[in-house]
Image (cartoon, grey):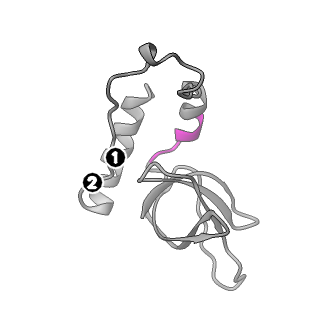
Amino acid sequence: MNGVVLWSDVRQHKAVIWCEDQGDLAFYSQKQPWSSMDLHEGDLVCFDLTLQHKTRLAVNPQVLEEAACAGLAQRLTVAGPIKSNREQPASDLPVSAQVIPFEGSRRRNGANACRAVRERIGG
C-alpha cells in the first residue's frame, strides 16, 4: 500500500498515514528501538497493511520520497470536513466524485500523485 504521512512523532517512532485506497487511516508504531525508521509529515511511503482489532496498521514502511506532500495535513484541515449523507439532503449530493489514484512508478509518480491531491483540495 502507498500513503502519505499526515502526522508523526519521531521521538516515539509513531505516525498516522493517509492510504491510497481512501479507507481508514493506518497507524505506525515502531517497537524495536534498534531499528530506526523515521517517518516525517508529508513523506510518501510504501508499507504492508495489516488489520488488528479493527485498526489498520502500517508494517515495514519504506520512504519513497521525503516531504513529497509537505503541508498536506494543513491543507486538508483548511478544506474542512465533507458533510455526511445524513446531514445533507439527497438533492444536494454530488452526482459523481473524482478519485485521485496513486498511479505508475512509486518514486517517479509519487510527487505527481501528491500534486494531484494538492490541486484537488486547492493547495
Q: Is residue 27 above or below residue 94?
A: below
Residue drawn at (43%, 25%) of the image: 122
Q: Pointer 1: what residue?
A: 113
Seen in the image, is 92 located left or right of residue 14?
Answer: left
The crowding category of the residue bearing disc 2, from other C-alpha atoms within 10 Å (few below 14, some 14 to 19, many at least 20), is few
Q: Residue furthest bottom?
A: 34
Tell me the SS state at disc 1: helix
- What range is drawn magenta here? 69-74
Identified by mark 1, the residue type is Ala
Residue 51 placement (x, y as % from top left) = 58, 69
Residue drawn at (63%, 77%) of the image: 36
Residue 88 sits in which quadrant?
top right
Q: Nearer the viewer, residue 24 or 75?
A: 24
Residue drawn at (70%, 83%) of the image: 32
Seen in the image, is 104 located left or right of residue 62?
Answer: left
Q: Are marks 2 and 1 in contact (CB under 8 Å)?
A: yes
Q: Is residue 29 above or below residue 31?
A: above
Q: Nearer the viewer, residue 97 or 111?
A: 97
Check the picture and name the quadrant holding the C terminus. top left
Identified by mark 2, the residue type is Glu
Q: CA distance from mark 2 to mark 1?
A: 7 Å
Residue 111 placement (x, y as % from top left) = 35, 49
- First reached walking from the N terminus: tag 2 or tag 1: 2
Residue 121 sits in which quadrant?
top left
Q: Residue furthest left?
A: 104
- Residue 103 numbered mark, or none: 2
